[in-house]
Amino acid sequence: MNEVKAGDAGGSLLMSAISACRSRLSAFIRGRTAIRDDAEDILQEVTYQLMKVEQPVENVAAWLFRAARNEMTDRARKKREVPFSGYFTADDEEGFAEDEIAETLFGVPQTPEEAYLNALLWEELEQALSELPPPQREVFEKTELQGFSIKRLAEETGASEQALLSRKHKAVLSLRTRLRDVYDALTGE
């Protein structure tokens, strides 16, 4: 296929190249994506990305498939990055309602008792954080308390995203156990 770029003849060459492989690309994406709306979003996103490319694209089909694969990988990584509050769920096999801890920590207290419990849990969280190895503490604090993304933190620290996710996971498991014990003690469960 000839080189094509977004500005060529009003983009008509580009649009015909996209149309030629759209059904194969759509099937490729749907085959690797569980949710149909996500597949459509990915298809639209890679088409949009191609329209923004300024340098000529030699093989439009190959470029689109590579961009789709990259987009699916990025989305999968984002889904794996579960916020701390997401680790507290009600489907624990012991039946402990851990969503109450998340609600207490991250919710707005409605009563003086809730405010007191919130303060105690935050105090315990800070103590537990101080006991974590520094790399685990840093990734947890920056991503959960300061709003950094894993990608941004990786760029800032030079560590790989996978290493940071692993550190965060270990920190969350440790904090989860610690806060669960404290919560049980405070609520008498």
Image: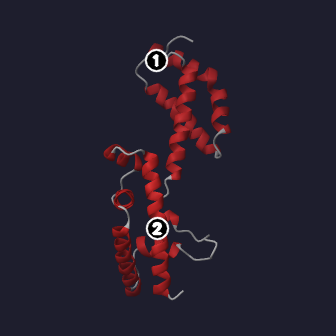
The structure's colour scheme is secondary structure
Which quadrant does the N terminus fall into? top right
Where does the image place residue 175, in percent across and percent down from the top left?
44, 69
Mark 1 lies on residue: 5
Rendered image: mark on residue 152: none
Q: How many marks?
A: 2
Q: Residues within 10 Å of mark 2 (few under 14, many from 20)?
A: some
The amino acid type of the residue labelled 2 equals Ser
Q: Residue at x 44, y 76 (%)?
A: 104
Would residue 83 be visible to someone looking at this image? no
Would residue 22 be visible to someone looking at this image? yes
Where does the image place residue 25, in percent across and percent down from the top left?
63, 29
The amino acid type of the residue labelled 1 equals Lys
* Of marks 2 and 1, the one in the foreground: 2
Q: Nearer the viewer, residue 143 or 104?
A: 143
Mark 2 lies on residue: 174
Q: Residue at x 54, y 46 (%)?
A: 76
Q: Residue at x 46, y 14 (%)?
A: 8
